């Protein structure tokens, strides 16, 4: 609330913008199990349009009419210094009236609203775009964004031809090593230890993730347990399709508190679990993908 005027989130247009320019729920949709800092996202523009990608902190990064996304962006675009993002990951172009995105052969895929980009795809304001594990929202007009909060960090613009490669971070990539030389499809998924504690009397359960605990209701606990088991038992599958559980399976197998659970109930359940994981400082460990369903964003460690 600024004065007597309620500032609305530019993505959903229904909830107050509580964090930066985004509401809490839209911000949660950008969350990732891979922790990064603001300094790992760098805008490089020459002739900026009024369009921008909004990051998890609510910062708009303006785009040129032809903008590249990747770990190594020499001229126009956004450099994302994170190992699940390829050197040249994707490209956004503006033809004067519409924006289009295409994947440029990335290792971990480009997604629009969790749908894999397999060909040049039109995008518009409010679309959630994910490069590997790092997601943004597109806004076609930064002039429509709420005024910045006092504490908000201003986007750093770096002029070309600087090229920055990310520094390896211990434990950030399963298997370790120098991620600058790795372009494998499993480069982004962390390996984590999960412990499940379910009381004999029912009423939910406790899940421990790398030492951090979260208390869940019965249905929430069943969702996490099923995804953990599925990811662990499908080690033979390619990572692109490994560990997914379809909504129809969740509707049939989970203990719902309604007689006729639907796809909407599944979405609400996933949102509540995501929020519980975030509040416990575990991170968003649930990935959703169009036509595939939901899965764990981590590989369970077998110890």
Image (cartoon, rainbow, N blue to C red):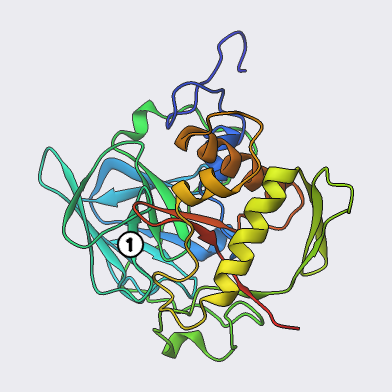
Q: Quadrant of the C terminus?
A: bottom right
* Residue 77 seen by the camera: yes
In the image shown, does 32 or 226 lie closer to the viewer?
226
* Residue 35 seen by the camera: no
Circle 1 residue: 110
On the image, which quarter does residue 60 sit in? top left
**Mark 1 neighbour density, 10 Å: few (under 14) some (14–19) many (20 or more):** many
Residue at horizontal 62%, vertical 80%?
Answer: 169
In the image shown, does 287 or 111 lie closer to the viewer?
287
Percent x, y of residue 283: 66, 56
Percent x, y of residue 67: 25, 58
In the image shown, does 107 or 245 lie closer to the viewer?
245
In the image shown, does 186 or 31 lie closer to the viewer?
186
Residue at horizontal 52%, vertical 60%?
Answer: 295
In the shown orientation, is residue 14 left or right of residue 218? Answer: left
Placement of 211 over or under 276, stated as above or below: below
Q: Give the SS element for disc 1.
A: strand
In the shown orientation, is residue 69 left or right of residue 93? Answer: right
Residue at horizontal 36%, vertical 47%?
Answer: 113
On the image, which quarter does residue 123 sit in? top left
In the shown orientation, is residue 32 left or right of residue 221? Answer: left
The number of callouts visible is 1
Percent x, y of residue 184: 41, 84
Q: Quadrant of the N terminus?
A: top right
Percent x, y of residue 107: 35, 76
In the shown orientation, is residue 203 left or right of residue 153? Answer: right
Toward the top, the furthest residue is 4
């Amino acid at each position: 609330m600024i004065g007597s005027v309620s500032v609305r989130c530019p993505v959903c247009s229904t909830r107050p913008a509580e964090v930066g320019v985004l509401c809490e729920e839209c911000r949660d949709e950008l969350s990732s199990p891979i922790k990064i800092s603001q300094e790992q996202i760098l805008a490089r523009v020459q002739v900026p349009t009024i369009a921008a990608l909004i990051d998890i902190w609510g910062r708009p990064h303006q785009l040129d009419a032809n903008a590249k996304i990747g770990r190594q962006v020499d001229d126009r675009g956004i450099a994302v210094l994170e190992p699940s993002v390829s050197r040249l990951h994707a490209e956004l172009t503006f033809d004067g009236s519409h924006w289009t995105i295409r994947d440029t052969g990335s290792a971990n895929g480009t997604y629009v609203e969790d749908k894999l980009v397999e060909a040049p795809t039109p995008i518009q304001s409010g679309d959630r775009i994910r490069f590997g594990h790092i997601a943004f929202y597109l806004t076609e007009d930064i002039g429509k964004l709420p005024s910045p909060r006092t504490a908000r960090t201003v986007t750093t613009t770096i002029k070309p031809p600087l090229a920055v490669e990310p520094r390896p971070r211990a434990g950030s990539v399963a298997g370790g090593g120098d991620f600058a030389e790795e372009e494998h499809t499993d480069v982004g998924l962390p390996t984590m230890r999960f412990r499940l504690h379910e009381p004999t009397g029912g009423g939910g359960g406790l899940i421990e993730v790398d030492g951090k605990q979260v208390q869940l209701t019965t249905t929430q606990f069943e969702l996490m347990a099923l995804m953990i088991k599925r990811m662990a038992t499908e080690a033979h599958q390619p990572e692109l399709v490994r560990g997914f559980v379809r909504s129809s399976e969740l509707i049939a197998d989970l203990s719902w508190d309604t007689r006729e659970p639907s796809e909407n109930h599944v979405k609400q359940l996933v949102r509540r679990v995501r929020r519980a994981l975030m509040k416990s400082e575990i991170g968003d460990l649930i990935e959703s993908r169009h036509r595939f369903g939901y899965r764990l964003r981590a590989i369970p460690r077998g110890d």
